Structures are given as C-alpha cells and as structure tokens.
Amino acid sequence: MSRIGDLFFFRKHHVCPRWLCFTFDNWVRRRIQNPDQIIRPCVRAGDTVVDVGPGIGFFTIPMARLVGDSGRVIAVDIQEEMLAAISKRASGAGVAHRITPQLASPVSLNVTVLADFILAFWMAHEVPDQERFFAQLYAVLKDDGKFLLAEPKLHVSRPQFDAAIGTAQKAGFRLLDRPSVSLSLAALFAKR
Ligand SMILES: C[S@@+](CC[C@H](N)C(=O)[O-])C[C@H]1O[C@@H](n2cnc3c(N)ncnc32)[C@H](O)[C@@H]1O
C-alpha cells in the first residue's frame, strides 16, 4: 500500500506519468492557481523562457502567449509524451511556432540557449540530484534573468523546500522573494 502511495505522491523520486496529468492540469487548478497571474510579473514580450518539467503545458501555453512572436518558450521534459501533448495543445492555441520542445535526460537539460526566465514548477522534487540540476539551471540563465521555483505543498515539506533553496543558493542563485502561490511553496531567485 505504501508503494502505491509513493507512486501516487511521487515520493522517492518517481516521475509523474502522462496519465496522471489530468489530476493537476485542469480547469479546477486554473481557478485556484491562475497561471497568468503567477507568471505575468516574470515574463515580458520577446523573452526566452525555459519551462523545465512542463508536464503537458499548464504554464507553457500561457507563457507562449506572453512572450509574443519575438520570444520563445523552451519546454524541457524527460518524457516525450509530455512534449507531444504540449505540441498538440500549442497548435490548438495557435502558439506552436513560439514553443521549442526539448527532450532532456534525467542528468542533462540539453539546453544551449540563455534564458531570461526559468520556471521549475512542481517538478524539482522529481529530480534525484538537485545540486547538479540547479547548477545546470544557473548556467542557462542570463546574468539579469530570474528563476521561479515552486513545489507542491502536498509532496514537499517546508524543511525539504528550505533545503532545496539552500541547494539553489549553493549553485549561485540569490534568493529575491518567497512569493505566495496557492497550494505551493515558492521562491524567486536572481542570478546575481
Ligand atoms: C508534476 S509534473 C509538473 C508539470 C507542470 N510544471 C505543472 O506545473 O503542471 C512534473 C514534470 O517534470 C518532468 N521532469 C521530472 N524530472 C525532470 C528532469 N530532470 N528534467 C526535466 N523534466 C523533468 C516530468 O516528466 C513531468 O512532466
């Protein structure tokens, strides 16, 4: 039974499977946790944004709308099924040309561009080596860029989140704020 719990709550670094996305990417969450309100302060037209661990694009599509035709969103996931779902949704929303799906491996982001903004929303607890992960994010962020980390309160305790903040700071990130995000623990970082 506890193994089923571990799987469902992604404890022990299980990766969220595609079939579970309907539980958190739906209109109910959109009402409680409006993606536009969360990302609007961080994303401007023309920006290059990295959405790491985007799932099926809860934030990717709204960010693609915000960056406009002069910007782009790189959706980086380790599961091809997630990226395929994003591409399908993006076509429906008319923003596919602004999104680059990028397949990563659990140990390498495979991102070569520099980002104005990085979003890691409800995904870092699935990454086994956070030290390496934050170091890679630090390397792809522009000097004046921002990084928003948010973890689900359901899966990540406050001490675990504080430890993740410490790991991000060790990688070089400077903690700017702890924004209030519903259902989440969140931290906004700058590179310098
Ligand atoms: C719970 S989903 C969150 C989706 C989305 N960010 C949201 O808020 O709806 C976590 C996603 O992170 C991805 N993921 C897990 N480890 C990853 C890694 N090391 N690099 C990139 N993506 C990863 C999973 O494949 C999954 O799509």
Image (tube, rainbow, N blue to C red):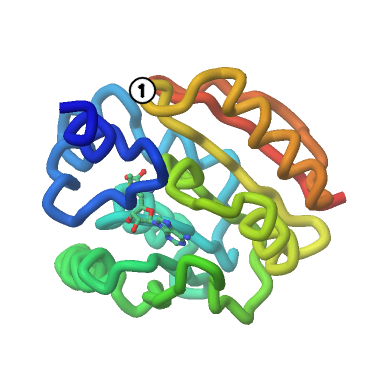
Seen from the viewer's position, the closer of residues 79 and 55 is: 79
Residue 116: where, in percent of width, then height?
Answer: 66, 61
Q: Residue at x 44, y 67 (%)?
A: 76
Q: Quadrant of the N terminus?
A: top left
Expressed as whole percent of the image width and height from the top left, the position of residue 27 reads 16, 34
The answer to whether residue 189 shows anywhere in this view is yes
In the image, taking residue 1 as reference, residue 32 lies left or right, namely right
Q: Amino acid at mark 1?
A: Leu
Quick check: 151 left or right of 159? left
**Mark count:** 1
Crowd tier of the residue under label 1, counting other residues whose Cα lies within 10 Å: few below 14, some 14–19, many 20 or above = few
Question: Which residue is disc 1 drawn over?
Answer: 154
In the rendered image of this protein, does residue 39 appear above or below residue 144? Answer: above
Query: Percent from the top left, x then y, of residue 160?
Result: 58, 27
Q: Is residue 161 rendered to the left or right of residue 7? A: right
Asked which quadrant contains residue 137, the reply is bottom right
| Residue 94 visible to an observer of this rendering | no
Q: Please provide percent x and percent y for residue 119.
A: 53, 50
Q: Is residue 137 above or below residue 38?
A: below
Residue at 43% across / 55% down in the picture? 63
Residue lying at 50% horizontally and 20% vertically, measured from the top left = 157
Q: Is residue 149 above or below residue 127?
A: above
Which one is in front, 6 or 178?
6
Query: Quick one: SS at disc 1?
Result: loop
Residue 183 relative to residue 21: left or right: right
Quadrant assignment, res 77: bottom left
- For the point 41% across and 46% down, the residue is 13
Ligand 1 is within 8 Å of the C-beta of the residue at disc 1: no
User: Toward which corner of the image does residue 101 lie, by quadrant?
Assistant: bottom left
